[in-house]
Image (cartoon, helix red, strand yellow):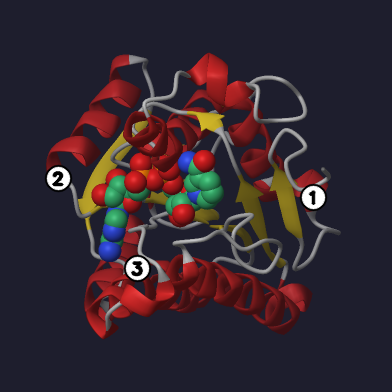
């Protein structure tokens, strides 16, 4: 018997990076997985990778910042698998710009996916979870937001700080309905294609050199991130409400 047997898990931004490894981890633990993304080729590839390993997965194209897409995503999930038990709101974007050079369009670009996207997803996920008697939601936040700042990431940080606020308030609204809502603040996870890899490429820095920047002396492994996400989605974590769990190899503690 696997931990998520009989459960249905939705992961947004599942075409690559942290979303892909999270979708794969749910499937390995028995869940039926819906991988959602705007990147059709990457999302289909994630679903195929899961099916190749013997798992059950479906790709659904959805832009999380468009409410009609999110509503349709939840409807299609329920049509395909009958319910929704776990949702990981992972889709996120970042573009570096100093605040004085940031444009309204650049600010809205971050708001669209990172904050409005999490709002729409939680709204429609919670509605469905209330119908099926409970569930668990994990929002993929960041250490850059309410915990730290980072030069060139003002717009990104503003949206991630917003995610932390949304997480806590929404968690309190539904705690009595057997729906848990928490967030993860990750940094430096070794998941191919993720934003940290994009940063390493830009800086021409190897994973070994990047690892030395962390107090633990190495980058995080994908399964160290997914262990945290799946734990927060499990029955064992039901007493954890509105929490921001840091998974960063000691970056913040330093
Ligand atoms: N990688 C890290 O170290 C790290 C650190 C802190 C926070 N995060 C957060 O984790 C999440 C995943 O990060 P990642 O590094 O895997 O990023 P990534 O860029 O590799 O993947 C993000 C995915 O989201 C999808 N996406 C973008 N906009 C979308 C939209 N509007 N609707 C649906 N899908 C959309 C992309 O197509 C992509 O597949 C993000 O929210 C990011 O802010 C990552």
| Image quarter (top left, top right, bottom left or bottom right) of the C terminus | top right
Disc 2 versus disc 1: nearer the observer: 2
Marks 2,1: beta carbons within 8 A: no
Q: Percent from the top left, x then y, of residue 70?
A: 31, 70
Marks 3 and 2 in Cβ contact (< 8 Å):
no
First-in-chain label (3 vs 2):
2
| Residue 217 seen in the figure | yes
Residue 131 visible somewhere in the drawing:
no
The residue wearing badge 2 is 40
Residue pointed to by mark 3: 113
The residue lying toward the viewer, choosing from 155 and 82, is 155
**Front residue (pair 142, 76):** 142
Of circles 3 and 2, which is in front? 3
- Residue under the image location 45 percent in, 28 percent down: 191
Q: Which quadrant of the rendered structure holds the N terminus?
A: top right
Which disc, if any, is residue 237?
1
Depicted 177 relative to depicted 11: above or below? below
Q: Which of marks 1 and 3 is nearer the N terminus?
A: 3
Q: How far apart are marks 2 and 1 (CA)?
A: 33 Å
Which residue sits furthest left?
41
């Amino acid at each position: 018997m696997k931990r998520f047997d009989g459960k249905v898990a939705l992961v947004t931004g599942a075409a690559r990076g942290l979303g892909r490894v999270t979708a794969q981890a749910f499937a390995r633990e028995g869940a039926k997985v819906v991988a959602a993304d705007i990147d059709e080729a990457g999302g289909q590839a994630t679903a195929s990778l899961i099916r190749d390993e013997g798992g059950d997965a479906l790709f659904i194209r959805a832009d999380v910042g468009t409410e009609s897409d999110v509503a349709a995503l939840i409807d299609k999930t329920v049509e395909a698998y009958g319910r929704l038990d776990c949702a990981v709101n992972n889709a996120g974007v970042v573009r570096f710009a100093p605040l004085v050079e940031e444009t309204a369009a650049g600010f809205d670009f971050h708001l669209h996916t990172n904050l409005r996207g999490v709002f729409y997803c939680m709204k429609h996920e919670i509605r469905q979870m209330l119908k099926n008697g409970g569930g668990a939601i994990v929002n993929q936040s960041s250490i850059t937001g309410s915990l730290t700042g980072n030069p060139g990431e003002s717009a990104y940080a503003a949206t991630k700080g917003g995610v932390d606020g949304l997480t806590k308030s929404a968690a309190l609204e539904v705690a009595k309905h057997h729906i848990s809502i928490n967030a993860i603040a990750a940094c430096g996870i070794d998941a191919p294609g993720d934003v940290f890899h994009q940063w390493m490429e830009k800086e021409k820095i190897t994973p070994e050199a990047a690892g030395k920047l962390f107090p633990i002396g190495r980058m995080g492994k994908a399964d160290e991130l997914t262990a945290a996400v799946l734990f927060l989605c499990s029955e064992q974590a039901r007493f954890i409400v509105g929490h921001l769990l840091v998974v960063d190899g000691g970056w913040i503690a330093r």
